Amino acid sequence: MGLVDGKVAMVTGGASGIGAATSKTLASEGASVVVSDLNAEGAESVARAINAAGGTAVGVRTDVSDPASVQAAVAFAVKTYGGLDVLHNNAAAFGADVIMQDFNVVDIDLAVWEKTLAVNLTGALLGCRFAVPEMLKRGGGSIINTASVAGWLAEDTRVAYSVSKAGLINLAKHVATAFGKQGVRCNAVAPGVVVTETSKGHMSEEWINGMKELHSTPRLIEPSDIADAVLFLASDLSRQVNGHVLTVDAALSAHLPKVEG
Amino acid sequence: MINLDGKVAIVTGAASGIGAVTACTLADAGASVLVADLDAAGAVRVAAKIAGSGGAATAWEVDVSDDAAMEAMVAAATDTYGGLDILHNNAAASQLAGQDHQLEDTTVDLWDRTMAINLRSVMLGCKHAVPAMKARGGGSIINASSGVTHGGQHRETAYAVSKAGVEMLTKTVATQYGRFGIRCNAIAPGVIFHDAIRNLVPPADKRIFEEYTLLPRLGEPEDIANAVAFLASDLAGFITGQVLTVDGGLHTAVAFDAAITAAHSEPPA
Ligand SMILES: NC(=O)c1ccc[n+]([C@@H]2O[C@H](COP(=O)([O-])OP(=O)(O)OC[C@H]3O[C@@H](n4cnc5c(N)ncnc54)[C@H](O)[C@@H]3O)[C@@H](O)[C@H]2O)c1
Ligand SMILES: NC(=O)c1ccc[n+]([C@@H]2O[C@H](COP(=O)([O-])OP(=O)(O)OC[C@H]3O[C@@H](n4cnc5c(N)ncnc54)[C@H](O)[C@@H]3O)[C@@H](O)[C@H]2O)c1
């Protein structure tokens, strides 16, 4: 028996990295998965891999920053699989033109700020807006926002990204508060540094090794580590967990840096 | 379901309440469980229940505040089952709650006994489990904290401070032993209604908990047991140093905001 047997799940940003891993994990534990992404081809290829492995999935092109597109994606999930139980708000604007231009408050271009908030934060609001009514029809559901330890710890750069992640944490608490009594749970998962195909492109070997030092476990975080945490939050095992931020960071944010000498 | 086949677990305070249900859940998931408690007869009952449904369990009498007894408890698990993978430090001095008041009325004796049973116990459990887990290449420790650490408390001064200590100890163990594959997390339940306390909670208080819990129902021991099983399992393989709140949202909403909203929505007298 799977942990999410019979549930219908939608994963945004499902074409790559953490979203692709979550789509596969939820499917292998029995959910029917709508793999939603701006990258339609990537979403379809993840869905194909799931179906080839005996799971149930379908890809759909979605721009999470566009209300009509999100509404259509949720309607598509309902039409295809009969309802919606799980939403993983995971898409983020990680293109080099955005994340590599996301500097401090003095230097950041306003267009970069707006793009980041539109995709990372407004995208999740829209996901909740259209998913909650569908979940209420089923008597409840579970929404998981991908936040980050950057949501409460600051860097000297990437202000838009961090602020969007802080917003995702409070958005989860808001939805938990507003709709929990009607059975809709909402939580956030906060990864530390996860090495994905996309992130490898942005990070130097040196930086990755430095990060390894700051994480307390023997290896760095992989997308499947986050997928397993999302699986828990999606499943009934977490049925009394609501408004929580589940940090998956190998204690990165639990300790002060160790200085030798 | 969660798979703990072949793993060896110790649950302290396992004779009643949350600990008893957690011991059963871990055994159902395939772990061999040392059911440890000061209440030896209760531990025997829980171990027998597990054995009766085909699981592996051994009852063990322990005073969790006692260094030698905790060392012996870990040795009992490794002697009986060949090693130790999971430790759930769950025992707490619920029996002292009735004497745990505001600061001015807190006696040194009550303070020291609470710290010994709630906090020293967790330090001792971790201290003796770490070498056994190192020998296996890793393990998972889950400490029982409480939602009380979310804010200042009007009562139960010693209890609240002991649980704050449990959370810092959790992060410290995670930081020091992560490199050995040992994960250490805490669980913070909100209010969990189980047989031992169900009838002790006045109906008026129960109504308040129902009102402030964001989900349609109150928490049950199974809710905590499932979270412990998750943290014990490889599904949580990268989660360490965390406090997992399992409270149905009890501590998420701003309480006074609800009171103000309610006041404004009341029809004028
Ligand atoms: N990788 C890390 O270290 C890390 C750390 C903390 C948090 N996160 C978060 O995890 C999530 C996934 O990150 P990842 O590392 O897997 O990144 P990724 O770049 O591999 O995946 C992001 C996906 O979102 C999609 N996307 C971008 N804009 C979109 C839009 N407007 N509409 C729909 N889809 C869109 C992309 O096409 C891509 O498939 C993000 O929310 C990210 O902020 C990642
Ligand atoms: N029930 C709740 O609402 C709630 C809420 C938050 C946190 N918690 C925490 O969860 C844990 C379990 O709580 P519970 O409600 O199941 O409590 P409980 O009183 O039902 O169980 C506690 C167990 O610990 C044992 N114990 C007490 N002193 C001991 C000692 N010195 N050595 C060994 N065993 C000893 C008792 O015999 C008992 O079996 C505790 O740590 C508690 O603080 C409970």
Image (spheres, helix red, strand yellow):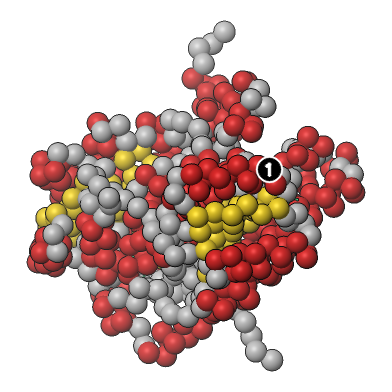
Q: Position of residue A170 (x, y in %)?
A: 45, 49
| Residue B80 position (above or below residue A197) | above
**Quadrant housing residue B251:** top right
Task: Look at the image and tell me whether residue A243 can be seen.
Answer: no
Which residue does the image show at 66% across and 68% down from the upper left? Answer: B75
Q: Amino acid at mark 1?
A: Ala
- Between residues A232 and A132, which one lies in front from this camera angle? A232
> Crowding at label 1, few (<14), some or many (≥20) Cα neighbours within 10 Å?
some
Q: Quadrant of the C terminus of chain B?
A: top right
Callout 1: chain: B
Q: Position of residue A89 (x, y in %)?
A: 30, 54
- Between residues A173 and A230, which one lies in front from this camera angle? A230
Task: Look at the image and tell me whether residue A102 can be seen.
Answer: yes
Residue labelled with disc 1: B41
**Quadrant housing residue B58:** bottom right
Q: Is residue A142 toward the left or the right of residue B233 in the image?
A: left
